[in-house]
Amino acid sequence: MTVDHSPRFELAQVNIGRLLAPVDSAEIADFVAALDPINRLADGSPGFIWRLQTESGNATSIHSFDDELIISNMSVWDSIESLRAFTYTSAHIAVMSRRRTWFEKHATAHMALWWIPAGHRPTIEEAKQRLALLERDGPGPMAFTFRAPFDAPDQADESVAAAT
């Protein structure tokens, strides 16, 4: 009998931000210049699985909201530890530390994490629902944050995660 050791769940993340100016403006040029190097870094990071992108290699032209200044970033990782390491211990931190240079301070939930069945790729609508859930109910097993993480469901809970 072979034991399947493949992960049953992967970690999805979304974060959104409202730019202070259009993506093609001089005010945002440093941010745009950092996109390709940071995306390459993410793509090669341990635990990285997938990210939302167009043929341009990023997601800045995907308008998930009515406001075209709001841009989204979505990705999938093998664990919260892998995503945390990329976010807070790689060159990504230098770009993140400058976010107020390019983005408004968000008044509502702007980042959410949630577990998905392995192989599933989250949609923008799914991500928007997770942000709304986090805003409405606070962190829980269906939408959480780095500060209030939840473990991946066990096999008994697999049908719950698959249904969301």
Image (spheres, grey):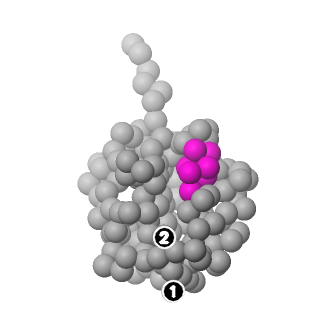
Q: Secondary structure at mark 1?
A: loop
Camera-nearest label, 2 or 1: 2
The image quadrant of residue 95 is bottom right
Q: How far across and how far down the image is residue 135, in percent?
A: 43, 79
Q: Secondary structure at mark 2?
A: loop
Q: Is residue 6 magenta?
A: no
Q: How far across and how far down the image is residue 152, in percent?
A: 48, 50
- Residue at image position (70%, 60%) is 93
Q: Which mark is residue 24?
A: 2
- Answer above or below: position of 112 versus 53: below
- Residue at image position (57%, 74%) is 26
What residue range appears in magenta? 35-42
Residue furthest top as drawn: 1
Image quarter hosting the C terminus: bottom left
Compared across the picture, whether 106 is left or right of 3 comes to right
Q: Which mark is residue 57?
A: none
Tell me if label 2 and label 1 are in contact, CB under 8 Å. Answer: no
- Answer above or below: position of 66 versus 36: below
Image quarter hosting the N terminus: top left
10 Å neighbourhood of mark 2: few (<14), some, or many (≥20)? few
- Residue at image position (70%, 69%) is 97
Say which amino acid is labelled 2: Asp
Say which amino acid is labelled 1: Ala
Q: How far across and how far down the image is residue 101, in percent?
A: 65, 77
Residue nearest the viewer, comparing 24 with 101 = 24
Q: Does any portion of residue 140 appear in the rendered image? A: no
- For disc 1, the marked residue is 107
The image quadrant of residue 98 is bottom right
Name the main secondary structure of what is drawn in magenta. Answer: helix
Q: How many marks?
A: 2
